[in-house]
Image (tube, helix red, strand yellow):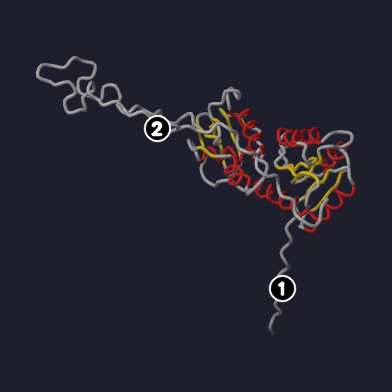
Amino acid sequence: MSSATVPEPPAPAPARRRILVVDDDPTVAEVVAGYLDRAGFAVDRAADGPSAVTRAALARPDLVVLDLMLPGMDGLEVCRRIRQDGPVPVVMLTARGDEDDRILGLEVGADDYVTKPFSPRELVLRVESVLRRAGGSTAPGPWLRSGGLALDPAARRALRDGRELPLTIREFDLLAFFLQHPGRVMGREELMRRVWGWEFGDLSTVTVHVRRLREKIEEDPARPRLISTVWGVGYRFDPLDAPATEPAEAAGSSPGAGQPPGPGHAPGAGQPPVSGRRPAPPPLPGAGTQAAGRRSDGGRPVEGGGDRA
């Protein structure tokens, strides 16, 4: 008598990641929630600051889409309070053309921002991008170290002199990228492309994140030693434990350096005569100079066509 094959039960569906949408405009909140729901996220909504803090405490979100201007408590304070219980990625919604609002959002630690009016599809892509970075390792492998700085890419932990640094997702990725490319000058466009994954965007985003990172890793952020500005070009990470560059002719490299020549010994025998060295030709006009003008901040994030919130 043959036994019937019992089919295996289907594997449980993976839990949907939870997004908290905070906006006092019911139309905007409804459109955003609808697009996120169709993208596979579980969506919770709040219409003011206090409600957002309460909902985040009851059910910890994987990411918060947060309007800056809210009744009862503004988005900056909501962001601070939600993060008191641990890091949470935040995508900030700001008014079009209000650069001060964007800068404030980035300075309080927003991982990304979208300006109103915006394409809901673009917002979904930004949310997915931030979540990928929050959940994945920047560079699996050994710790990255420089002086008192130590960074574990796999666990996404950063330490300074043994104490943990409270870095946002983008700050962590930016520091990891600098540690992986010491001594190399990188423009803001390259940093935006390789750290943020954007081909276009507001370059002030990079500027603000570099400033915030300096405040957390430099002894004196006003006189940075680790992250140097190369005017007109970009930034360079100078590791504290890099070997000092020695001059081409170090003291004591020639025979009898520091001593008078002995009898029958020609000064600098076997070496180019010091006193007879031909002077270096003058530099060509303009050689080695660098334009001091600031680069343009480039275009803003492109708005998609069609649906708008």
User: Residue farthest to the front?
Assistant: 285
Q: Where does label 2 land, which residue? A: 284
* Callout 2 secondary element: loop
Q: Is residue 290 above or below residue 201?
A: above
In the displayed orientation, state which residue is furthest to the top.
260
Relative horizontal placement of residue 132, taking residue 252 as reference (left or right): right
Q: Nearer the viewer, residue 81 or 69?
A: 69
In this view, the residue in front, 68 or 268, is: 268
List x then y, in percent, for residue 111. Answer: 70, 41
Q: Is residue 135 left or right of residue 306?
A: left
Query: Where in the figure is residue 92, as x and y percent of width and height?
Result: 76, 41
**Residue furthest out toward the bottom:** 1
- Which residue lies at the image location 79% right of the left edge and 34% below the top edge? 76
Q: Are marks 1 and 2 in contact (CB under 8 Å)?
A: no
Cα–Cα gap, marks 1 and 2: 81 Å
Looking at the image, residue 281 lies above or below residue 304: above
**Splitting the image into 4 quarters, where does residue 304 fall?**
bottom right
Q: Residue at x 51, y 42 (%)?
A: 142
| Foreground disc of the pair 1, 2 | 2
Q: Secondary structure at mark 1?
A: loop
The residue labelled by disc 1 is: 7
Query: Label 2 neighbourhood size at 10 Å, few (<14), some (14-19), many (20+)?
Result: few
Dot 1: few (<14), some (14–19), or many (≥20) neighbours within 10 Å?
Answer: few
Q: Position of residue 251 (x, y in %)?
A: 29, 21
Residue 43: which disc?
A: none
Q: Position of residue 43 (x, y in %)?
A: 82, 51
Amino acid on which disc 2 is placed: Leu
**Quadrant showing the N terminus:** bottom right
Under mark 1, the amino acid is: Pro
